[in-house]
Amino acid sequence: MTLDAFAAIVGDAHLLRAPGDLARYDVDGRQGGGAALAVLRPGSTAEVSALMRAAAAEGIRLVPQGGRTGLVGAGLAKGEVVLSLERLNRAPAIDALNRSAEADAGVALSTLNEAAGRHGLFFPIDLGADPSIGGMVAANTGGARLLRYGDVRRNLLAAEVVLADGQGTIVELGRALWKDNSGLDLKQLWVGGAGSMGVVTRATLALQPRPAAVVTAMLALDRPEAAIQLLERLEADFGAMLTAFEGMSYAALDAAFEHVARLRNPFAAGVPPYAVLIELSAGGAFGEDLLEEALAASLTSFMEGEYASVSDVAIDRRDGLWAIRHAVPEGLRARGRVIGCDIALRRGDVMRFRVDVAARLAAAAPMLQLHDFGHIGDGGLHYNLVWPADVAPFDPVVAERARAIVFDAACNDYGGSFSAEHGIGPVNLHYYARFAPAAERRLAGGIQGLIAPQRIGRVDFGMETGR
């Protein structure tokens, strides 16, 4: 096996081999542990195609890598060669009238939104991180505003893909059209494919008008179970103007306020048992005063009377309340080792799951502290556990046993998913083999074998376990 053929394509400056040069490519958003043999940094789709052909000829497996913000290890190599797409970063092309953007795989989300913002538009996938567009397609990223705008799959109009067919064939899938029912929507095969179905080098994305009026409110709930009734009311009253509906437990909020000095608790009575962050947004015909007045009227029955459940409301027209929500992961990390569980449930099951599985964990792993939060409006729940820094040394066996309890309950007892938005990678591939039906895995593996016989990336969808 030789890397010389790669140098002839990208040049010596973009074939990295020295340990010092490789180090940053062995770490992603949550963990390190990568061990890349080398890193290739192509500067064009043509170079990606040539590298794919050379890799097939040399029998070298490539691992596509985006902005290294992923949480399941899909972009980290373990003895393979990383195919970094960071140099595919030409300025996005914005078609304001069509409300669409063409962006290279290496373009950062913030860069795309800066370009779109000059036209009063934005790409509505809201995240705490700043991923690359190619990585977002590979993971099918969701985010806090999925309730209104959907995930990447819903907002992808077209994609340029280099096939892992041994020839590096370049295909254009879809067009910059908001509706096109002229055949199979083939581009979707690469959405959520973890970089293992081929290499997305460019994407055409749907943009949305940036709201002219935005009101954010954080509600203190005395009874967490009332969150779902509150969600129903707000959806009935505001429809698509309800942009986000986030939930945070006492433990999650307390961790943020305790460890993130820049935050201010907006509730005079202290940290509530549960809090909900809601965002309402609308166009220029609806001023923020009108939104606030309508919100106050909608909340009246939840703040007065025998069944009142909302004890306090904080309202913001900036990003102060969102800062609290985005600081929760930082607060958890300050308390100890985070054991992340990114699950999806039917919306009506979220609050019951919280209580049910908390009891199971308390019996099986009493040293772990539950800090749950997440996108309650779409059923996504970060049911995260913290191994406190001041207890016994971290035990990965106990931690994985706890994750298994959460995932078993989510998938087997509640009909949910073990991966709501983080995607599939080595970190959770064994759960894919465990919970995805055998027929589904055979079908996915068959499709992968057909369109990506060269085998790239870290995920083999038809296999029982991850590599």
Image (cartoon, helix red, strand yellow):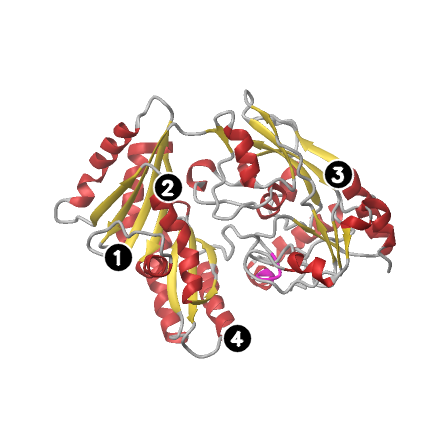
| Residue annotated with mark 4 | 397
Query: Which structural element holds mark 2?
Result: loop
Q: Residues within 10 Å of mark 1 (few under 14, many from 20)?
A: some
Residue 298 appears in the picture as rendered? yes
Coordinates of residue 368 in the picture (x, y in percent): 40, 71
Residue 166 appears in the picture as rendered? no
Dominant SS of magenta comes to loop
User: Which numbered disc, 2 or 1, marks the residue that appears first in the sequence?
Assistant: 1
Q: Find the distance from the CA under tag 4 to the CA under tag 2.
A: 39 Å
Mark 4 or 2, closer to the camera: 2
Q: Amino acid at mark 3?
A: Thr
Please tell me which residue lies in front, 77 or 410. 77
- Left of 352 or right of it: where is 210? right
**Residue shown at 67% from the left, 49% from the top:** 195
Q: Amino acid at mark 4?
A: Val
User: Which numbered disc, 4 or 2, marks the residue that appears first in the sequence?
Assistant: 2
- Left of 148 or right of it: where is 179? right
Query: Which structural element holds mark 4?
Result: helix
For the record, the magenta segment spans 425-429
User: Which numbered disc, 3 or 2, marks the residue that appears first in the sequence?
Assistant: 3
Image quadrant occupied by the C terminus:
bottom right
| Residue annotated with mark 1 | 271
Q: Find the distance from the CA under tag 3 to the CA under tag 2.
A: 38 Å
| Residue annotated with mark 3 | 45
| Residue annotated with mark 2 | 319
Q: Amino acid at mark 2?
A: Asp
Q: Determine if the magenta segment contains residue 459.
A: no
